[in-house]
Image: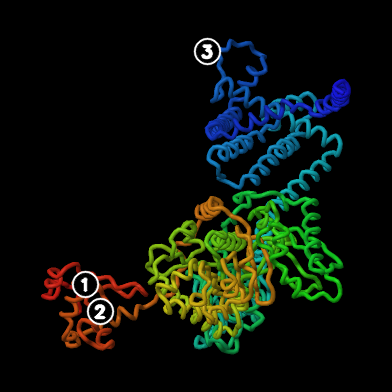
Amino acid sequence: MAKNTIKKLADEEIASAPKEEKAAKSKKPAPASNGRWSRFKAFWQEPRVQKISGIFLVLFSVFVFLSCVSYLFNGQNDFRLVQGTEVVDSFSQSEPYKNWMGKIGAHVAWFFMNKYVGLGALFLPLVLFMIGIRVWLKRDLLPFWKTIRLSVAAMLFFPLAIGFMFHNRVDGFERTIEITCNQNLVGGFGHFATEWCTYTLGWFGTLMLLLFVSGAFLIFNFNHRMEAVWARIAEWWKNRAKAIEPDEEELDETIATVNTKQEDKASVPPVLINSIKEEPIAEIEEEEILMEELPELELDIREEEEVAEEELIAEVESPVELDSVLPVDSAMASTSTLVSDDENFSVEIEQGEDELSEEDIKQKIEELGPFDPRRDLSRYQWPSIDLLKPHGGQGPQINKEELEENKNKIVETLNHYKIEIAKIKASIGPTVTLYEIVPAPGVRISKIKNLEDDIALSLAALGIRIIAPIPGKGTIGIEVPNSKPDVVSMRSLIASEKFQNADMELPVVLGKTISNENFVADLAKMPHLLMAGATGQGKSVGLNAILVSLLYKKHPAEIKFVLVDPKKVELTLFNKIERHFLAKLPNEGEAIITDVQKVVKTLTSLCIEMDDRYELLKIAGCRNIKEYNGKFTARRLNPENGHRYLPYIVLVVDEFADLIMTAGREVETPIARLAQLARAIGIHLIIATQRPSVNIITGTIKANFPARIAFRVTSKIDSRTILDSGGADQLIGRGDMLYSTGNDLIRLQCGFVDTPEVEEITDFIGMQQAYPTAFLLPEVVDENALEMGNFADEDKDELFNEAARIVVMTQQGSASLLQRKLKLGYNRAGRLVDQLEAAGVIGPFEGSKARKVLIPDEMALEQFLKGGASNSPF
């Protein structure tokens, strides 16, 4: 028995030996290159190494630049020393190197300029400098990749172009000497490229190639700027041609006008030109000879008239950049005046037989072109996509095994309750996978809906949501969270073609749908947005994503933000773009509002701005801001009548619940009024809150906020308060949200933008040219302050002193306290409180909080009552 056991063990060891050898062979050792690369990567990521490398590149770029510039002046002397045609000791003082950077500088300049790219080497230091700044300071002084692209293109193009210019100057042996002397300009690359192109394409072919490459390069990089340059050149040439070759009919009309003025000085000419010189006209008036009577003198008179007419046409027909716009309707005013930037130019068009026709005015408008609201900040650059970081992976991290396992568990769970399925398919999203099932005929939808908790139990997953049925489809949806959710990067959303080509007034990219598609919405069509969610579920990130979307798409002249941040920490990063994008009240320090009283004033100011805009729309005959701005940019509205370009205004309120608790109806009323009326004139509201309870989000507010975003909340009651339906309580958090426009719910994964990214974007915008101040809202008159100052001495209540003593003793300023202590009615106690506030005994009203007592003790009060307080109106 023992022998048999030993024999079996030996056989098993023999059989397992080949397997172990195969397994050992199959396990290949990791290549040593991976270890070296990981060590190098860790070494390079060391901040000290990056700083040292960046400083070295910056200094080396300056060294190369000075070497190349010096080589242009001292290259002939250093050329012989570098080539070795003259043997000179390295430390000899007989004929040293004349390069500013010494021997090394001469060799470096010879290597890059003489041997390779000639003058193109002057662009190499710029490339090294940009790389060094990025490695050292982690920022770009210029657009990084665009600068690199332009510099490399110039390094390759300039040697070929300069070599082509010097190619056919001389022939034979003299040509060889010429090329040698000009080697500093074209380099070896330029010489070789010129020889090859002229041999292959000929002289004309090389010229055509250079023109084509330069034109394609300019169009590819500066297309929009080139169009503006060509338009200005064409306009200048057109006006110059008009000034040089005036029309004969215009000359005849001018001469007839001058003669008519001499005969009848009482008549008024149709066009009065204030800045015309009077000397040529005086010479013509002295000539009392008619051209028809003396044909032989026609040429001399015409020459004099041409001088006067050229000056006249040069004054009138010169291109004028009007700050104002021209009225199209001639019935708008009896006299219209066009005033240009030149103070000496003024044209009056008077009513009468000789007034300008509508065609002339339209032609003048066409010459001026449309009004550009971006003109004041024409050099503004939109933030680069490189300021955003690529968070997360490249797509949903889910495998087929997980999909099949979830499908089988869903089918198995439904079969336990005798529910048959005809078809099932899956749509993979960044954080959630949607399983669409088609039930067999005769199966009730409510039966599947009631199995929500059972399916969640079988899948061991949190946040199972059943959509029964899916709107627009004949299927039932079961949303199951992925085991490895993917982070949706804001960089991928901003760079998407759907956002870049969005034909919307205020495009906002919110995130990705369950089908992994980018979701872009128009804030102008929402028209107001309500956001709610528990703490830490992504509400602040969602606000930043909306603001970043608008910053990447709109110019500072086209949109302004009014930011309200009671927490004082969420929106402070946007302080840096105050003079670009923010709006505030006059004489206010910070544009971001944190004080409750200032919030009330700002909302009141927005209501005044809304009324003013509606008045402008009524005068212009427009129904919305898009039509009004279209008329204004087409120069059909006159700024002298109060018309102006109207930017969109977006009011962002973070933590709306705190405002309602402290200010109450003072905040709710203007918010409701703006939500009801402000849509047409370009004022849009974004309100965020943590407490979506009924007393915070009232029915009046909900009725005017059709677009709502719900992040994860704690109960179904909160979900119904926000969305009027459940579902928000079943989200998984971390940016998972439901977007509702009133019709259906869309589940999205919000784009993630981190605080350092927002800071870099605001820094980039803040460093650019800006307006002198932030956009100023209408000033609000404090009615309470006026009422306080109206108390006269005879209106002082008899119990004023006693009430002041009670308030100071108890350090509580309230009407109910005075009612109890002095046994007064509420009305008289309220008047006493108003008088105490006017006298400076207590502070202003602060909502649910008690009023502050401004006098510390009774001794100070006695001095105050005896006349020590100069600010008292009594």
Q: Residue 855's quadrant in the figure?
A: bottom left
Residue type pointed to by label 2 = Leu
The image position of residue 621, as x and y in percent, is 59, 85
Badge 1 density bin: few <14, some 14–19, many ≥20, Cα 10 Å: few
Type of the residue with mark 3: Gln
Give the Cα distance between marks 3 and 2: 100 Å
Is 31 rendered above or below residue 282?
above
User: Which residue, given by chain and number where applicable, does mark 2 sit on?
Assistant: 817
The amino acid type of the residue labelled 1 equals Thr
* SS at badge 3: loop
Q: Residue at x 45, y 72 (%)?
A: 777
Q: Are marks 2 and 1 in contact (CB under 8 Å)?
A: yes
Can residue 288 be spotted in the picture? no
Per the image, the residue denoted by label 1 is 810
Label 3 packing within 10 angstroms: few (<14), some (14-19), many (20+): few
Q: Secondary structure at mark 1?
A: helix
Q: Give percent across and percent down for residue 93.
A: 52, 12
Q: Which mark is residue 93?
A: 3
805 or 5, which lies in front? 5
Helix, strand or loop at label 2? It is helix
Between 370 and 231, the residue placed more toward the observer is: 370
Q: Please determine whether, in this image, residue 232 is positioned above or below residue 691.
A: above
Sequence-wise, the earlier of marks 2 and 1 is 1
Give percent across and percent down for residue 601.
40, 74
Q: Is residue 239 above or below residue 352?
A: above
